[in-house]
Structures are given as C-alpha cells and as structure tokens.
Image (cartoon, rainbow, N blue to C red):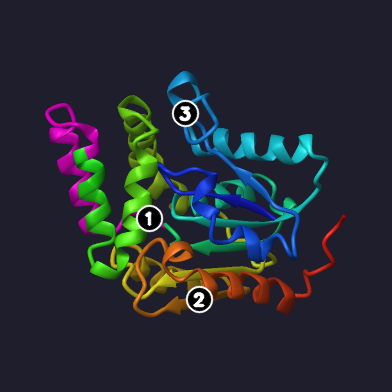
Amino acid sequence: MILIHGIGGSSSIWFKQIRDLRKVFNLILIDLPGHGGNEQGICDDDDRSLFRIARQVLRVLDHRQIHAAHFVGISLGTIIIQAVQELSPERVKTMILGGAVERIYKPLLTFLKLMEWIKFLVPYMWLYRMAAYLLMPRKRHAEARRVFIQEAVQLGQKEFFCWYNLLCRELNPFFERKRIYDETPTLYIMGGEDFMFLPTIKTHFYHLKNSQLYIIHKCGHVCNIEREKVFNHRCIGFIRSNGMYSSKAN
C-alpha cells in the first residue's frame, strides 16, 4: 500500500493510520518533492508537472520491484495518485482518495486569485493559515488544522509558491482531459464538512462505475486525522470487499 500526503505535509501525517494498516499491508509512505525528508523540491526541477511527480512515484515502485499496489492519498495526494493511474493504470490496484481534490471549487479559486495579488506583501505562512481556516473552519477541525499548519512550516515560501503555481496551472485542465478507468476500484472518503471539495466530488464521482463515496459526518477536509478509526476501517474493508486482499508478506 502506497500512502501519499497532502500539500505542505509529509509522510508523518499518516501517524494515525500506520498501526492499523501495517497489520494488514506492507506500507510505503511517500514524501513528495520538497516535503518531509525529500529535499529535492519542484523548484529545483525545470519540468514542474503532475506527471513528472507521478513518474517519480512510479520509480519508487520500480526500485522496490513492485508491479502494482493499493494507493491511499489525502488532498494533494489524491491528485498525484490519479496522475499515476493516468500514466500506468495497470499498476493501481485500488484507489482510496481521502479529502479528494478534483477541480478547484469557486470559493477556493477566488481565494487563490487573492493570494496571487498579495503573496509578495505578507509572509506565506499567513496565507497558509488563512487557507487552513478556509478548508477547516470549525472547532472540531482544530487538530487537523494544527497539523496542517505545523507541517507547512518546513516547506518554505519558495517551494510553497512553486506548488501553488503548479496546481493553479494544471489542476482543472488535468481533470478536464483525464481518461476514465472503470476497472480501478475507487473509494472516496470525504468529510461532510469538507465545504471546498465535497460538492465537486458529489457531482463528478458518479462518472466512474466502479466507485463508492463514503461521507463521514461532522468531519472536515483532513478526514484521516479527524476520524482515523472510520478512515482506517473503510480502507481495509474496501480492499477486502473488492477481492484485492491477500495476507501481508513477511
């Protein structure tokens, strides 16, 4: 099982999943460029694209001699997983997309345009905190919001805006052009209070015949942290229910 974190995070955001999932699966936790232990950022690369990052993930599988795997992502990680699927659908056994991002919802797009105007006038962490409260505004989102902000400090302003520019440029066009692979069992796990991204998922996920949507009530965007027991249970149950489960290798 390959786990891919969200923007500004790192593999450490899966701390509430590791104990449960490692009992069933062999885990590989990816640090995306510029995040966590991956010091090679996308600002250091002339080719800044979703597919470039997806190819880097595939190289990890090649290095470990893994032909195919289950993929679990949160937020940005769900975009990268779908880019991997676009390049090599045969290597994606299942996709579990938590807090899935598919296109930028209009209120968030307005905020991003505002950021474009003021990004050089204020510290980027102010903007990141504003984004955190926009995505996770309620009191019960506090832990996820705190982790979201703490992790982002390590990213740095230059790398943050390289990711920002990449997503603003490529995200909507990627999903407008993306091919549909009905063969890949897909589970969307969304917080009922994920106001920025749940509306889009409700509208678009039905295009995939082999997809399911599970909504966790009283939960925000980063559902793997806010409601980890439900998230973990749904991940394991989904893979088992699709006949994709085998005993963990030694």
Q: Could you tell me if the residues under marks 1 and 2 are in contact, i.e. CB atoms within 8 Å? A: no
The image quadrant that residue 56 belongs to is top right
Q: Secondary structure at mark 2?
A: strand
- Identity of the amino acid at label 1? Arg
Magenta-colored span: 102-125
Residue 208 vs residue 78, the one in the foreground: 78
Residue appearing at x 50%, y 39% in the figure: 50
* In front: label 1 or label 2: 2
Q: CA distance from mark 1 to mark 2?
A: 17 Å
| Mark 1 surroundings within 10 Å by alpha-carbon count, few (fewer than 14), some (14 through 19), many (20 or more) | many
Q: Which mark is residue 44?
A: none
Residue 172 vs residue 185, the one in the foreground: 185
Q: Which mark is residue 48?
A: 3
Q: Earlier in the sequence, mark 1 or mark 2?
A: 1
**Horizontally, is 93 left or right of 226 in the view?**
right
Residue appearing at x 70%, y 66% in the figure: 183
Position in image of residue 230 (x %, y %): 52, 76
Q: Main secondary structure of the magenta part?
A: helix
Q: Is residue 110 visible?
A: yes
| Mark 3 surroundings within 10 Å by alpha-carbon count, few (fewer than 14), some (14 through 19), many (20 or more) | some
Q: Which mark is residue 103?
A: 1
148 inside magenta stretch: no
Q: Earlier in the sequence, mark 3 or mark 1?
A: 3
Residue 178 vs residue 109, the one in the foreground: 109
Q: Could you tell me if the residues under marks 3 and 2 are in contact, i.e. CB atoms within 8 Å? A: no
Q: CA distance from mark 3 to mark 1?
A: 19 Å
Position in image of residue 83 (x %, y %): 56, 47
106 inside magenta stretch: yes
**Horizontally, is 29 left or right of 78 in the view?**
right
Residue labelled with disc 2: 213
- Identity of the amino acid at label 2? Leu
